[in-house]
Amino acid sequence: MITVAWPGSVPVVYSRLERLGFEYIGREGAHLPQLNAVKVPANVDEARLRSILLNEYSIEIGAGLGALAGKIVRIGLMGQSCSTRNVALCLPALDAALPAARSQTPSAARVIRGKSVA
C-alpha cells in the first residue's frame, strides 16, 4: 500500500485545485490520493500550462493520454513529490501559471519573467 508522506496534503490539494477551476475526473470516492487526474479549466491550454510549470517553476505534471490528451493533467503526490514543501510550491505555481496558459489568438504571445511563451 502506498501512503502519502503528508496526509494533510490530500484535502488541501483537492479543494485548492477545485477553487482554481480544475475538475476531478472519475467517480466520486474512486480518486487516488497519489494521482490527481483533473480536467483543465475552460480556455486553458494544457500544454502551455505544463510548459510554464516546467520551464518557470521546475514542476513537471503529466499530460492526459489517449482520448484525454489535451483535456486533463495528472498531478502526482507520491514519494518525494508528496512533501509539505513540494505541495506548497505546486499549488501557488499552478495559480500563477493559469493566466498565462489561457488560450489566446495565435499571434499574441505572453511574456513571463522576460520569456515569450507561445
Image (cartoon, grey):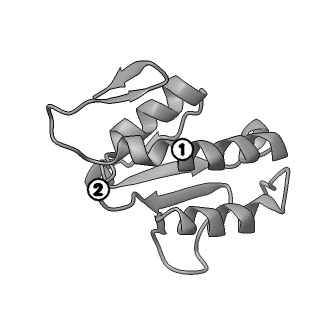
- 102 to 112, vertically: above or below: below
Residue at image position (51%, 34%) is 53
Residue at image position (58%, 75%) is 30
Q: Amino acid at mark 2?
A: Asn
Side (left or right) of 29 relative to 44: right
Residue at image position (49%, 79%) is 27
In front of the other: 8 or 2: 8
In front of the other: 79 or 57: 57
Determine whether the residue tagged by mark 1 lies in a helix, strand or loop. Answer: helix
Side (left or right) of 77 relative to 97: right
Determine whether the residue tagged by mark 2 lies in a helix, strand or loop. Answer: loop
Side (left or right) of 103 relative to 27: left
Residue 23 point in image, percent of width and height: 46, 68
- 116 to 4, vertically: above or below: above
> Can you tell which quarter of the image residue 17 is in?
bottom right
Residue 102 point in image, percent of width and height: 33, 48
Q: Residues within 10 Å of mark 1 (few under 14, many from 20)?
A: few
- Residue of label 1: 96
Q: Residue furthest top?
A: 114
- Residue of label 2: 43
Q: Where's the C terminus, which quadrant?
A: top left
> Can you tell which quarter of the image residue 1 is in?
bottom right
Q: Residues within 10 Å of mark 2 (few under 14, many from 20)?
A: few
Residue 32 point in image, percent of width and height: 63, 64
Q: Amino acid at mark 1?
A: Ala
Sequence-wise first label, 1 or 2: 2
Label 1, label 2: how many angstroms apart (C-alpha)?
Answer: 15 Å
